Image (tube, rainbow, N blue to C red):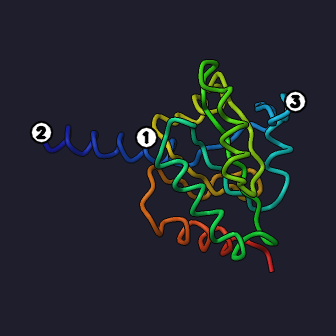
Amino acid sequence: MKKFISMLIIALTATALCCSAQKISPDMTVKDLSGNTVKMKDVLKDDVVIVSFWATWCKPCQNELDALAEIKDTWADKLRIAAISIDNARSASRVLSTVKTKMWPYEVYTDESSVLAKSLNISSIPFVMIVVGGETVYSHTGYTPGSERILVEKALGFLKN
C-alpha cells in the first residue's frame, strides 16, 4: 500500500509539473475585432503580457476586465493586456458591442472555436495568465474583487528594469 501511495504521489506531482507551465504556441491564431487573423507570436510580442480568457455570458469575466480597466493607471504604460473571448459562433456577435460599451483599454481577440483555449486545457473562465517571453509564469482561474491588483503587481514584477 505504501508503494502504491508513493507511486501515486510521484505520478500526480509529475502531472502537475508537466501541465502547470502552459506554453502558447506562437503559430496558434486568434482574430482581432475586425476579423483579421493574428498569430499568438504577435499578440505576445512584448516581454510581459497578461492574457485573459473571457466570454460575454461570463459575469465574473466582465467584472475582472472592468476592474483591470479601473486600475489602468498602474499598468497602462508598462504592460499589455490581451483579452481573448471564447464566445462561440452563437454569442460571438456580442463581443464587439460588449467591448465598445465597456470601453475596455485592451487588445481584444476572439477564439471562436476555442482552439487556443483547448490547447491550453482551459476548462473554466475567467482564466488569466502572465506570459513572459512566450512562457506562462502565472495562471489563475476565477475572479474575486481585489485579485486584479495582485495580478498586475505580479506582472509588473516580471518587467526588466
Q: Residue at x 55, y 71 (%)?
A: 149
Q: Amino acid at mark 2?
A: Met
Residue under numbered circle 2: 1
Q: CA–CA distance between discs 1 and 2?
A: 21 Å
Q: Count residues near mark 1 (Cα–Cα under 10 Å), then give few for <14, some for 14-19, many for 20+.
A: few
* 1 vs 3, front mark: 3
| Disc with the residue nearer the chain's start (1 vs 2) | 2
| Residue 125, percent from left and from top | 49, 42
Q: Eyeballing the image, is 149 above or below 32?
A: below
Residue under numbered circle 3: 36
* 1 vs 2, front mark: 1
Q: Quadrant of residue 154?
A: bottom right
Q: CA–CA distance between discs 1 and 3?
A: 36 Å
Question: Between residues 123 and 12, which one lies in front from this camera angle?
Answer: 123
Q: Eyeballing the image, is 80 above or below 31?
A: below
Q: Residue at x 68, y 26 (%)?
A: 93
Residue under numbered circle 1: 15
| Disc with the residue nearer the chain's start (2 vs 3) | 2
Label 2 SS: loop
Q: CA–CA distance between discs 2 and 3?
A: 56 Å
| Residue 1, percent from left and from top | 12, 39
